[in-house]
């Protein structure tokens, strides 16, 4: 009787005794931070807006990659990352065809944020759980214990991944690099899970892997370099599983069958993607598609990843975007993106690895890094697909040492503040706030938008200045991007648009708006060119590494002056 009472008491106490593990609390906090990162104003790189589809579908500028004569980007990734979530949003909200700049800015970010939980967190979780279960498969009671442990605690790999600034910022934005990283993550998990269970591998798995390779290739052609070791590992797994037979023909047949299924999935999906791209580029050129023969005739010239590969193989083309040392990826971009993970990765090269799956991840990192380093144009975001493999390799090492945990925390907090809060952070708010500065400048303004000049900033996405239906092209301002031009170029543009005495056209505007940092427009320059500047608004914080505000010794004053200002320019 006592035994029953004790057990009955224990059963009754279990629900009140169960508490949320600290790892779950930390993960929930990190998940909330990731959602909040969708609203961060930091401007990492123009390709977020100009390759992700926001400017292409809702702005007034067609990015050069999507011009029919270039056709080096597939239309499918921006359709998926921007047009699809915007269509769903408009349908749910009941405003079909009506979307404003703020919605086009936020909805794709929230969509990519949701995908990041599935393509990054959940996939890594599945790999960790599968690896642990596989290691303890000989003992069923241990297997059950480990499964329960992974349900009650968040794996260290997932926590390290979720706290990475690369995931918090890049993972929630419609970069093609983010989509490339997501596809590679899914492919890795597919190969690892099916590789651990030979009986589960069949032609459907192989076809799906081929489809993933096609999607990744058409997202960015660099996907091939990251995925190649993964696919080799999958083929070797097939060979190894059949090698036990005395007749090696079974192993050869398994590999050949796998290759055929991969090719079917890759080719069928690639044909569909090429067809979609061809229809898009033909419509952009002639306005409509007359026949299937027209599509088939143009199709060979609209294979976007091949066009991109040919373009990037020419050093003269890359010089327009900036040339870098061949070691930039290895010694600059890897530490910027991954910090301690990159140092641990380099330190571990040449040592024996814990499993074949970790070895496959290492090969993916090395192969991708080596091939991308052979090109002279190197940006940190090109290495984003390395995120999941490098986390799987070294996350346990970081989580097991307290000083590495603190280093990892400090590193990611610093980089998040820099890129997510400070870097070019005034550009987006200045565009979203355009409606607040609409002024009545006469009948000429009513027939054409007010010139809005951006000077020494990142490229301004024009769609953010829209305040009404994009179908009605409701734009209040005509945006002029002077990039990093000289003051002489700014003077010429102002004199061309302002209704001044020296304006030879005898027509123009009474005022023009200029958005720049205030220290770039000196009082001497205003006097020499007879301009009057009226300060309208400031957007703080804003840090431009190309034009840092002069430091006068006062840190507080320096921080306050990190702002982007909007001026109304008039003729004196």
Image (cartoon, helix red, strand yellow):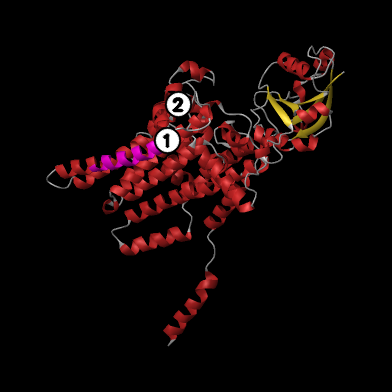
Q: Most prominent secondary structure in the magenta stretch?
A: helix
Q: Position of residue 429 (x, y in %)?
A: 71, 37
| Residue nearer the viewer, 223 or 396 | 223
- The residue depicted at 52 percent of the width and 75 percent of the height is 13
Residue 272 is inside the magenta segment: yes
- The residue depicted at 43 percent of the width and 42 percent of the height is 183
Residue 210 quadrant: top left
| Residue nearer the viewer, 244 or 406 | 244
Marks 1 and 2, how far apart at CA: 17 Å
Residue designated by label 1 = 275
| Residue nearer the viewer, 264 or 228 | 264
Residue designated by label 2 = 308
Judged from this view, the residue extending furthest toward the bottom is: 1
Judged from this view, the residue extending furthest toward the left is: 246
Q: Position of residue 186 (x, y in %)?
A: 42, 45
Q: Position of residue 361 (x, y in %)?
A: 38, 40
- Whether residue 260 sits left or right of residue 151 in the image: it is left
| Residue nearer the viewer, 176 or 276 | 276
The label on residue 95 is none
- The span picked out in magenta is 257-273
> Within 10 Å of the Cα at label 1, are there few (<14), some (14-19), or many (20+) other Cα atoms?
some
> Within 10 Å of the Cα at label 2, are there few (<14), some (14-19), or many (20+) other Cα atoms?
many
Q: Secondary structure at mark 1?
A: helix
- Whether residue 318 sits left or right of residue 263 in the image: it is right
Q: Secondary structure at mark 2?
A: helix
């Amino acid at each position: 009787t006592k035994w029953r009472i004790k057990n009955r008491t224990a059963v009754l106490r279990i629900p009140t005794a169960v508490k949320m593990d600290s790892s779950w609390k930390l993960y929930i906090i990190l998940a909330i931070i990731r959602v909040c990162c969708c609203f961060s104003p930091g401007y990492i790189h123009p390709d977020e807006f100009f390759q992700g589809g926001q400017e292409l579908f809702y702005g007034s500028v067609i990015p050069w990659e999507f011009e029919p004569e270039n056709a080096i980007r597939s239309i499918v990734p921006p359709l998926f990352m921007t047009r699809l979530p915007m269509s769903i949003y408009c349908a749910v909200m009941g405003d079909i065809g009506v979307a404003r700049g703020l919605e086009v800015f936020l909805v794709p970010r929230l969509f990519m944020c949701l995908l990041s939980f599935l393509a990054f967190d959940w996939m890594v979780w599945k790999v960790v759980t599968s690896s642990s279960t596989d290691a303890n498969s000989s003992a069923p009671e241990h297997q059950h214990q480990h499964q329960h442990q992974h349900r009650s605690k968040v794996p260290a790999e997932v926590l390290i991944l979720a706290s990475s600034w690369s995931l918090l910022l890049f993972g929630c934005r419609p970069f093609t690099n983010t989509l490339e990283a997501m596809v590679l993550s899914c492919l890795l998990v597919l190969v690892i899970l099916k590789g651990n269970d030979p009986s589960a591998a069949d032609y459907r798995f192989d076809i799906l892997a081929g489809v993933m390779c096609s999607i990744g290739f058409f997202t960015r052609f660099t996907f091939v370099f990251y995925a190649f070791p993964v696919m080799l590992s999958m083929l070797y797994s097939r060979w190894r599983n059949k090698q036990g037979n005395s007749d090696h023909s079974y192993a050869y047949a398994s590999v050949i069958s796998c290759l055929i299924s991969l090719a079917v999935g890759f080719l069928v999906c690639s044909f569909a993607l090429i067809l979609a791209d061809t229809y898009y580029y033909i419509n952009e050129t002639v306005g409509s598609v007359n026949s299937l023969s027209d599509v088939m005739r143009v199709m060979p010239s609209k294979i976007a990843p091949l066009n991109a590969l040919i373009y990037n193989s020419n050093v003269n083309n890359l010089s327009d975007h900036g040339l870098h040392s061949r070691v930039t990826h290895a010694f600059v971009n890897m530490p910027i993106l991954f910090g301690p993970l990159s140092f641990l990765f380099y330190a571990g090269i040449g040592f024996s690895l814990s499993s074949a799956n970790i070895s496959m991840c290492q090969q993916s990192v090395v192969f991708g890094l080596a091939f991308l380093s052979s090109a002279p144009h190197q940006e940190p975001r090109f290495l984003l697909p390395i995120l999941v493999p490098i986390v799987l390799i070294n996350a346990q090492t970081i989580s097991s040492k307290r000083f590495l945990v603190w280093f990892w925390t400090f590193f990611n907090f610093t980089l998040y503040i820099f890129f997510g809060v400070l870097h070019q952070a005034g550009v987006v708010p200045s565009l979203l706030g355009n409606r607040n500065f609409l002024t009545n400048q006469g009948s000429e303004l009513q027939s054409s938008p007010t010139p809005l000049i951006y000077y020494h900033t990142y490229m301004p996405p024009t769609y953010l200045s829209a305040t009404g239906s994009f179908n009605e092209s409701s734009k209040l301002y005509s945006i002029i991007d002077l990039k990093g031009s000289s003051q002489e170029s700014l003077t010429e543009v102002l004199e061309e648009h302002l209704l001044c005495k020296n304006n030879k056209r005898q027509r123009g505007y009474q005022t023009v708006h200029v958005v720049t940092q205030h220290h770039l427009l000196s009082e001497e320059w205003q006097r020499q060119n007879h301009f009057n500047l009226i300060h309208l608004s400031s957007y703080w914080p804003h840090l431009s590494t190309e034009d840092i505000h002069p430091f006068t010794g006062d840190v507080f004053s320096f921080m306050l002056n990190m702002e982007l200002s909007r001026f109304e320019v008039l003729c004196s």
